[in-house]
Amino acid sequence: SMVELIAASDQPPDWFCSHYWGEPIAEFGKCVELHQRVHGITACYWVCAHANRQHSLDQELLADLTQTSFYKAMSKCRGVLLILDEAGPATPFTRIWCAFEVYTALTDTAHDLVLDVACTADGRAHLLTQGLVDAEQRLADLDTLHSTALAHSLMSLRQLCFPMRVLEAGLSIELQQADASHQADKVRILNSIAGTPGEAPPPLEHPQYDEVNLRLRAIMARAGWDQAAMHGLLQQLGFDTALHADRWCEHLMLDLSRLPALDDQTLAAVGTGLPTELQRLSIDCSSVMGPSAASSGVGQLVRGLPLSLTELSLLFHGTSLLEDDALAALAAHCPPSLQSLCLKFSGLSLIHI
């Protein structure tokens, strides 16, 4: 391999790059450079084209996928960097080896991998991270009144320009429909995901397929939520549906304060988009809400609160008007499992009760 030719010693990887080999090398490099810059790291990335011996690649494509170089490399990494393209859009979602790598990142609890997503558009790289990066986490760890919310706001702002076409493609992903250069690879990978042995035709549908599809769709929905909300596209493009289906999500923070306006439609989309098994929820509705959103919209939001919820925080700082029927709806629809409720009304110009 190229690495064997140029390296003087072992090169243990920190991050595994999942991509489809079709993007320009310059764009690939920009994604990796941005990934290092945002994380504040100097890291070693495992890239199949350079790490595997391409003239004997068949030796790496084993029936037991846990014995392939791909899986072994991922098992040594902190996480997977999935590199998408805008032209496709998101061509790796249609490639079966990328499907296997994403599946491993999302479900392999033994190695607890992180999944980050990068893409280039108009010559610039953009990055989605699974949670806060180290600098943002240090801010959140200050544990002051606004530090956690500010840290999550910073994460949302740096993800705000991620290409919408790519996000939208991720909302309808079905990895079992992905293609392979060799059909045998697709059979092995789908059988491995489904847990079915041998070389028999894999099942057309399986709960493991559904888990990967739903979790990846939700990742794209959370990342693009602010951008879609600003354009009134949450329900039209299915962002709320994708987020609602993420039954693995237990903690969610939504900052609606950055929106130029907040209407009933957006609040309703928040209500219909809340994951069914959510336990902790924090929503910042401060500063932007107008009279048209004060009653009906808040009512629709609280009616969507999942029954599993144990902690709820709602911030209405600086809201122009909050009427009594909105508060009545909140009181009427508080989940019975709720153990902690935090409501902040500071700076309201008027409350009708």
Image (tube, helix red, strand yellow):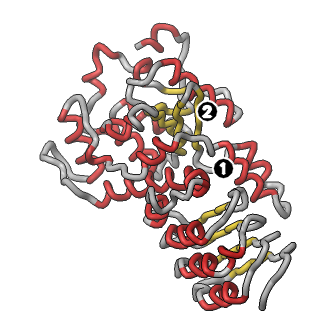
| Dot 1 alpha-carbon crowd within 10 angstroms: few under 14, some 14 to 19, many 20 or more | many
- 170 left or right of 176? right
Callout 1–callout 2 Cβ contact below 8 Å: no
Of pointers 1 and 2, the one earlier in the residue sequence = 2
| Residue at image point 53% right, 36% down | 118
Q: Position of residue 337 (x, y in %)?
A: 58, 85
Distance from label 1 to label 2 (Cα)? Answer: 16 Å
Question: Can you identify the residue that label 2 sits on?
Answer: 35
Q: Position of residue 343 (x, y in %)?
A: 76, 78
Picture quarter with the C terminus: bottom right
**Disc on res. 156:** 1
User: Is residue 9 placed above or below 303 in the rendered structure?
Assistant: above
**Residue 107 can be seen in this image:** no
| Residue at image point 66% right, 76% down | 311
| Residue at image point 78% right, 72% down | 319
Q: Position of residue 308 (x, y in %)?
A: 53, 78
Say what secondary structure mark 1 lies in: helix
**Which three-letter amino acid code belongs to the residue tagged 2?**
His
